[in-house]
Image (tube, rainbow, N blue to C red):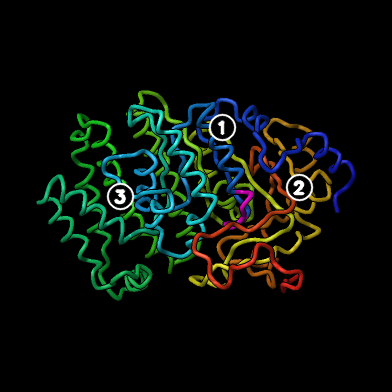
Amino acid sequence: MANQSTLDAIRREASAVAADDAHDALLREIGDASIVLLGEATHGTEEFYRARARISQRLIADKGFDAIAVEADWPDTVRVSRYIRAMQSAAQDDDAEASLRNFRRFPLWMWRNRETVALIDWLRSHNAGRQALQDRIGFYGLDLYSLRSSMEAVVRYLQQVDPEAAKRARARYSCFDHFADDPQHYGYAASFGMNKGCEEEVVRQLLAMTADAEKGLNLDAAAADERFYAEQNARVARNAEAYYRAMFLGRDESWNLRDTHMADTLDALREHIGRQNGRPAKIVVWAHNSHIGDARATEMGDHGQINLGQLVRERHGKEAYLVGFTTHAGTVTAASEWDTPAELKKVVPSRPDSIERLFHDAGIGNFLLPIRGRKAIEAALQERRLERAIGVIYLPDTERISHYFHADIVRQFDAVIHIDHTRALHPLDRTSSWQHDEVPETFPSGI
């Protein structure tokens, strides 16, 4: 239980926020930071998506941010970005929902949802008033799961600009052909010496794509973008190959490889946009709290894991601003097992010894809590507490071991937004497991 002085400190420093808050206070706290990382405590909460969209819109409209980078695969988001920016190379997508059709893998709801469609519509409308392509806001993925689709995108691009180079790329990537579309099968076989592995081939292809970097210097904005997209797909293929091999060697190694890839992708994106705009690029990032909260402040960091938030802070210092999100109770969209349908689940009220319960007990409801530079909050919240993390799978019956970890929230984030009671994200692809607006009171839950 929290002592009274801790609760009083939170009440003094916190600012109440409404469901559709304008977030003026947060924008003042962010100041001149050029990389704003917005977290989420689950991958299936409506309020987190809506709040991040509202904050991103303000950063774009009021502070000149150039792009949104999200925890999603590069080739899938490039299709969305082309639609948002009305690029001539865009697929014939008539609306925002159509632009999301490249998202075909589990978990579909993470980006194929009602809240993302609303954000895409806003971005497209905002870009409509911008004449130059390089001034239009983009939407990009930081992740590396797209081994097959990234290789296919590299070959498609080269087929248009250099057919001979496309043949060489196709030959190199053919190393993966006998694994069909199962990169985990490839990773298992390569890790345990069941096949030679394709590391050399993906590295050679990436070197071939980047060796003639000067070729991109005299391209117009559209052609330069397409070249950058292809080069990044080659990087994804190289890092995805390493990731799927590392999956079977230990969780820490694969986690660190993935988050380093996300940080490197963010830096490459900033460099590309900055080169086109002639000024340092400003990017807002969406990812789970476990990725954007500094790992050094958590028990995962104690075990050797690094993450995106830590790397961004180490590389960019005060240019980075990390915002975490928490909730006490409500509903969430999540699965019970990997690659199973989305379900509407009840979120168990937070544990008495957690940071979420502390925020709930403050009695403010929804609020913004600035942390950076707030001595009273730093002193009040300096001890580690349990913090909840719900990903694409939610297991309420084993919640303590499955979803809680210890963290020092003062060092983990620069600010926190707490939404006390949250609702499930609305998937575009609803199944019989997701069919109610609210979970019935009799819905089973665990302790």
Labels 2 and 1 touching (C-beta < 8 A): no
Estimate the x, y position of residue 258 in percent, counting from the top left.
44, 54
The quarter of the picture where the N terminus appears is bottom right
38 to the left or right of 418? left
| Helix, strand or loop at mark 2 | loop
Dot label at residue 58: 1
Estimate the x, y position of residue 280 in percent, counting from the top left.
42, 27
Task: Judge whether 385 appears above or below 279 on screen.
Answer: below
In this figure, which residue is indicated by the disc labeled 2? 383
Estimate the x, y position of residue 274 in percent, counting from the top left.
37, 29
Identify the residue at image location x=68%, y=50%: 326
- The residues tagged by marks 2 and 1 sit, at their Cα atoms, a distance apart of 33 Å
Labels 3 and 2 touching (C-beta < 8 A): no
In this figure, which residue is indicated by the disc labeled 3? 92
Q: Picture quarter containing residue 446?
A: bottom right
Does 285 appear in magenta? no
- The residues tagged by marks 3 and 2 sit, at their Cα atoms, a distance apart of 53 Å
| Helix, strand or loop at mark 3 | loop
Q: Check disc 3 and give the amino acid type.
A: Gln
Q: Check disc 2 and give the amino acid type.
A: Glu
Estimate the x, y position of residue 334 in percent, counting from the top left.
58, 64
Task: Please give the range of residues in magenta.
Answer: 42-48
Q: Check disc 1 and give the amino acid type.
A: Arg
Callout 1 crowding tier (Cα within 10 Å): few <14, some 14–19, many ≥20: some
Callout 3 crowding tier (Cα within 10 Å): few <14, some 14–19, many ≥20: few
412 to the left or right of 107? right
Dot label at residue 355: none
- The residues tagged by marks 1 and 3 sit, at their Cα atoms, a distance apart of 29 Å
